[in-house]
Amino acid sequence: MSEISKEQVLHVAHLARLEMSEKEAENFSSQLADIIAMADTLNELNTDNIEPTSHVFAQKNVMREDKKVEGLPLEDVLKNVPEEEDGQIKVPSIID
């Protein structure tokens, strides 16, 4: 696998809108190269007789029955809110 250059790290940081110094980019470049090298060791595994899977356990549409359960009493809910008015949670307005 090829090395990841400092310029590539800075470019990806720019795309992600992250501010990064030259020194940080050099450090991340080295760390990313180590991570890719470690992941590259997976290519050495012999997977010829291993069936492709998406899950370790064979499960199909594991569902549970919907059950109606009682929620918290209104008084308990309102104890945990910063502000309430007329039995309802009051939140800041988001529309001008």
Image (cartoon, grey):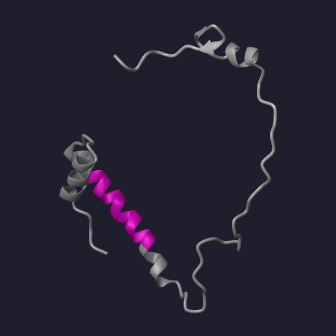
Q: Residue at x 25, y 54 (%)?
A: 12
**Of the pair 77 and 27, the residue shown nearer to us:** 77
- How far across and down, in percent of the image, does residue 30 sit? 31, 59
On screen, residue 76 versus residue 34, left or right, reads: right
**Quadrant of res 94:** top left
Please state the extent of the stretch shown in magenta in the rendering. Answer: 26-39
Would you identify the image quadrant in which residue 47 lies?
bottom right
User: Total marks drawn?
Assistant: 0
Is 78 placed above or below 21 here?
Answer: above
Q: Quick check: 26 above or below 43?
A: above
Is the C terminus in the top left, top right, bottom left or bottom right quadrant? top left
Q: Residue furthest top?
A: 86
Magenta stretch: dominant secondary structure: helix
Q: Is residue 30 magenta?
A: yes
Of residues 67 and 80, the one nearer the viewer is 67
> Toward the viewer: 59 or 12?
59
Q: Nearest the camera: 29 or 84?
A: 84
Q: Is residue 1 left or right of residue 81?
A: left
In the rendered view, tell whether residue 27 sits above or below residue 50: above
Query: What is the quadrant of the N terminus in the image?
Result: bottom left
* Residue 13 belongs to the span the image colors magenta: no
Q: Position of residue 64 (x, y in %)?
A: 77, 55
Q: Position of residue 49 (x, y in %)?
A: 60, 92
- Left or right of 73 in this view: 24: left
- x, y (%) of residue 46? 54, 88
Judged left or right of residue 29, residue 44 is right
Q: Is residue 49 above or below residue 9?
A: below
Q: Residue at x 48, y 77 (%)?
A: 42
Could you tell me which residue is drawn at 28 percent across and 47 percent down? 16
